[in-house]
Image (tube, rainbow, N blue to C red):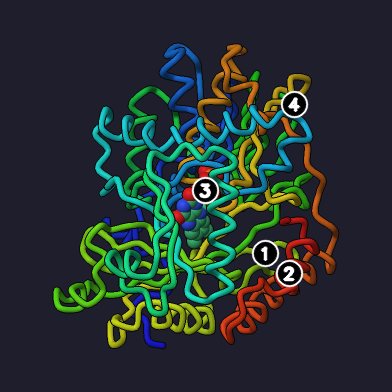
Amino acid sequence: MEVKTNGNLSFWYADMGGVPNYREPLPGDQHVDVCIVGAGFTGLWTAYYLKKVDPALRVVIVEKEFAGFGASGRNGGFLQGGISWSREKYLSGSSRAGVIEMDRIMHQSVEEIIRVAEAERIDADIARVDNLMVAATPAQWSRLKKKFRYSVDWQTPNKRFELLGPTETKARIRVKNALGAIASSGSARVQPAKLVRGLASVVERLGVAIYEQTDVKRIEPGRVTTSRGTVRAEAIVRATEGFTAGISGFERLWLPLNSALIITEPLSDSTWDEIGWSGHELLGDNSHAYCYAQRTREGRIAMGGRGVPYRFGSRIDQRGHTQDETIGKLHDILLRVLPQAQGAQIDHAWCGVLGVPRDWCATVGLDRKTGIGWAGGYVGRGVATSNLAGQTLCDLILRRDSPLVHLPWVNRAVKQWEPEPLRWLGVHSMYQMYQLADRIEARGGTGTSWLASAANRLTGRA
Ligand SMILES: Cc1cc2nc3c(=O)[nH]c(=O)nc-3n(C[C@H](O)[C@H](O)[C@H](O)COP(=O)(O)OP(=O)(O)OC[C@H]3O[C@@H](n4cnc5c(N)ncnc54)[C@H](O)[C@@H]3O)c2cc1C
């Protein structure tokens, strides 16, 4: 499969005229109130709310590369709130009402991000759109109907949450073989690199120093050791999500799971007439290997999915460069879902990592004894959820007894991943089983393949 550009962070940076220049590194040792490690959405939102609440606070961010280098500048641009992980797992430290309340507050992050973007004049191609999760096999359709009942049972707060039949689904987007869909309101489409870069500028204007090209080697109580000097701070925030395994002492905390995207050239008006998609919905399918797509500002399709899911020893990609095999697989998925895009040039392919905890459930917290806080493990909902994490970390650091600090995901302990080679074997087996389950389900039959259920149990996802 021919692509014009592979890697170089992401198409979103090409769309902005290229990868940005670096800010200055940490000039030497410093003593501040709060030191944040990592300038993605988590770190930047935390800094934003801290400075809004207490403008006198001395806050610095130390970043290995540049603000937005990680998943925040490379993702699929789904601004979608709410719990996408097992609600039941949060019940161990909370009540059913507590989990429902957390879901409601997580949904609100979407509107909060739009509010800040408007107030701070961040132009990130944000458009409020529906989310459409489509089923294309009988097994996917029966799973989707179950998912619908499950979400209703858990009092999903979306204003509109509907099950669509095949005709209604195709009236929105002519996905091949669509049997039905869940359509939900309350989401938005974004150009993520514009959002993260815009947010970094806002945070800087509020008086936060962002030191780039500053590699954090060690995080200890009261001290962050970097390649450029030491920062002493009363509070420290680890905001490195998918890169966390690269910091000493955190090697097995969150697994760096790879996700990859391809993007087409802008499609012609006649192709768009064939596809429909005039509502610019966020599009996802209900296969086990899962794909997601957005229609961009300029009428391109950005389609993402899992490539090589995980590299041995928690290694990560080189600036988004993606294997040819992954690009080919994503192109096959694109044509399986939207064959109308046949013949469209693929302009860019890239990938990145997100941090996955052993139980696949996001957490945020602050250890009072050490003064070290963290947030992440958002597993595909990080664009919205990192905002709530930033608000929560702000309240935890400033000791504000807000409702946010009592939500079930706060200070939740999770166990570590297994040492290699078990980690690699577990994740690769899981995705192979998912792919096989999808192939079996594509032959017909309404039941979910036992292989998918076994894969979920194997890696702690269920
Ligand atoms: C391809 C892809 C598609 C995705 N699609 C979506 C989507 O559509 N919607 C959604 O909600 N979520 C999506 N996600 C997940 C989402 O993007 C992330 O969960 C979210 O951006 C995480 O933000 P973060 O700030 O915690 O981490 P990151 O954005 O990864 O930021 C971490 C930062 O820490 C820095 N860092 C790492 N190590 C060090 C160190 N030693 N010293 C200093 N700095 C360091 C990195 O350079 C980086 O800038 C996707 C992820 C990927 C990879």
User: Is ligand 1 within 8 Å of the beta carbon of the residue shown at mark 3?
Assistant: yes
Disc 2 residue type (three-letter)? Phe
Q: Residue 208, located in which quarter of the rendered image?
A: top left
Residue 334: x, y in percent?
A: 40, 78
In the rendered structure, the answer to whether residue 199 lies left or right of residue 49 reads: left
Q: Are marks 2 and 1 in contact (CB under 8 Å)?
A: yes
**Element at label 2:** helix
The label nearer to you, 2 versus 4, is: 2
Disc 4 residue type (three-letter)? Pro
Q: Are marks 4 and 1 in contact (CB under 8 Å)?
A: no
The label nearer to you, 3 versus 1, is: 3
The dot on residue 381 is 3
Disc 3 residue type (three-letter)? Arg
**Element at label 1:** loop
- Name the N-terminal-most of marks 2 and 4: 4
Q: Which residue is mark 2?
A: 312
Residue 396: x, y in percent?
A: 62, 20
Q: Which residue is mark 4?
A: 221
Categorize mark 1 by other alpha carbons within 10 Å: few (<14), some (14-19), many (20+).
some
The label nearer to you, 3 versus 4, is: 3
Relative to 91, residue 422 above or below: below
In the rendered structure, the answer to whether residue 365 lies left or right of residue 128 reads: right
Q: Are marks 3 and 1 in contact (CB under 8 Å)?
A: no
- Name the N-terminal-most of marks 3 and 4: 4
